[in-house]
Image: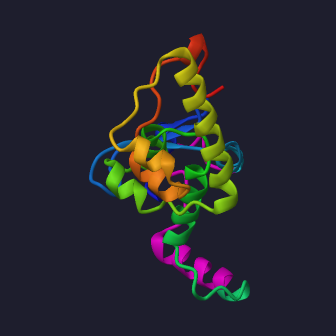
Amino acid sequence: MLAAEWKHYDPEVGTIWLPVAKNGKGRFLLLTIRAQEIVESLRGRGEGGRIFKVDRDALVTAYRRARAMAQMDHWRWHDFRYEAISRACEGDMTDMELMDFSGHLDVKSLRRYRHPRPEIMVPVFARLKLRVAESRRCGLWREPRGAAQAAASSSSRSVEKALGSRFLRGRPCGRSIRE
């Protein structure tokens, strides 16, 4: 990312094109509004060249100093990425959207970042339960194998296992699935 150049920054879309990313392939770095504000505030845009005019060693030194001042010696650089992806997983993004956000090429590697907090997941399961009920009412739901046994159990873990990663596809009763 330190090699990112101004010619690869698109302020209209809010992206920076990274010709070579960690996985060896090019990808777009999707910027948050705050990240885009920071990029916009940097000098040197008219000159071209690199966006971040700092080398790796200087960044590592500054990071170590900041980490020591914050008394967070256990915090690694990668923990920022981990935290951002973990929080994004708690939102309403699909796996494909999360993969675009994080740069992962497969769902398996993306899932290592997912550690949902109970206070986040309880409402998610409540919404899923409402969607299933609505789809059943409209005749759009087909029970997955093993769901009847899981439904008889009060364990949410067995319900989750029976449903697996199966999410409703289509539009129950003509409404968007995310409503």
- On screen, residue 162 versus residue 25, left or right, reads right
- On screen, residue 83 versus residue 5, left or right, reads right
User: Could you tell me residue 138's position as x and y percent?
Assistant: 55, 15
Magenta range: 42-67
Image quarter in which the C terminus is found: top right
Q: Is residue 111 above or below residue 11?
A: below
Q: Please count the marks in the image.
A: 0
Asked whether residue 145 is drawn in magenta, I would say no
Viewer-side residue, 159 vs 69: 159
- On screen, residue 15 versus residue 121, left or right, reads left
User: Could you tell me residue 30's position as x and y percent?
Assistant: 53, 42
Tell me the residue at 57%/66% (across/down). 80
The answer to whether any part of residue 167 appears in the image is: yes
Q: Is residue 84 above or below residue 124?
A: below
Viewer-side residue, 144 vs 73: 144
User: Could you tell me residue 149's position as x and y percent?
Assistant: 41, 47
Tell me the residue at 64%/38% (across/down). 127
Q: In which image quadrant can residue 33 be found?
A: top right
